[in-house]
């Protein structure tokens, strides 16, 4: 019977942040800075006869909670919100919280027995970047509110470069 033979050894590493990234705005600024300034020296490449930038945004998601509190400030209900983009997330949260004048929202507030507020301490955000190293490797860097994960790389120099850069970014301490 034939055996499987290892063709490559991909690695992954995670950096836990000492404190979560405080706002979606700061999170988005960090991701956009990486895309625009390419601090890891990623290179463009050709795929399906199309030029692909060295760093591109991949999958992302944003989630959080709207809590309902009664007059005694006791939590009496909650609505979980999950969205594929930060814009959709912000729109969903603000619509739920600010829509008290709309009949449907008033009915929800009555049914919940309280008034809504966004509990941002429960927010979660994630954005994966697809990156192409000058050595030809394609790897991912996933930013989360509380961590950064580098995955799918083989060359240790890739992680070393990202780690050196991350050491200079206050949000990633």
Image (spheres, rainbow, N blue to C red):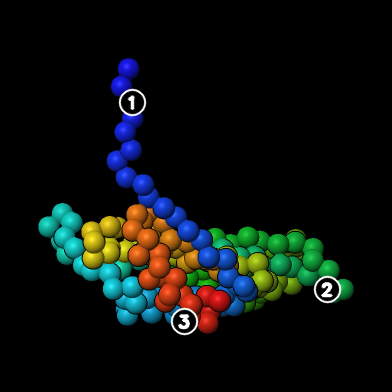
Q: Marks 1 and 2, how far apart in space?
A: 63 Å
Locate residue 147 relative to residue 76 in the image: left or right.
left
Q: Are marks 3 and 2 in contact (CB under 8 Å)?
A: no
Q: Residue at x 23, y 69 (%)?
A: 43
Q: Marks 1 and 3, how far apart in space?
A: 45 Å
Q: Determine which residue is flagged by label 3.
A: 168
Q: Determine which residue is flagged by label 1.
A: 3
Residue 8 position within the rendered picture, expressed as x and y whole percent measured from the top left: 32, 45
Q: Which mark is residue 76?
A: none
The reply to whether residue 61 is in sight is no
Q: Quadrant of residue 68?
A: bottom right
Mark 2 element type: loop
Q: Is residue 137 above or below residue 55?
A: above
Residue 32 position within the rendered picture, expressed as x and y whole percent measured from the top left: 39, 77
Q: Determine which residue is flagged by label 2.
A: 73
Q: Quadrant of residue 36?
A: bottom left
């Amino acid at each position: 019977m034939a055996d499987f033979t290892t063709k490559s050894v991909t690695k992954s590493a995670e950096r836990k942040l000492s404190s979560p990234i405080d706002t979606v705005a700061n999170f988005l600024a960090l991701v956009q800075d990486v895309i625009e300034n390419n601090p890891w020296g990623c290179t463009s490449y050709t795929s399906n006869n199309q030029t692909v930038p060295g760093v591109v945004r991949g999958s992302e998601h944003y989630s959080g909670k709207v809590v309902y509190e009664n007059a005694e400030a006791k939590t009496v209900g909650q609505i979980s919100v999950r969205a594929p983009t930060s814009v959709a997330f912000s729109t969903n949260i603000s619509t739920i919280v600010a829509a008290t004048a709309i009949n449907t929202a008033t009915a929800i507030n009555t049914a919940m027995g309280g008034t809504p507020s966004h509990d941002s301490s429960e927010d979660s955000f994630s954005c994966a970047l697809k990156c192409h190293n000058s050595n030809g490797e394609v790897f991912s860097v996933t930013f989360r509110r509380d961590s950064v994960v580098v995955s799918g790389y083989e060359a240790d120099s890739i992680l070393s470069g990202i780690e050196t850069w991350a050491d200079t970014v206050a949000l990633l301490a």
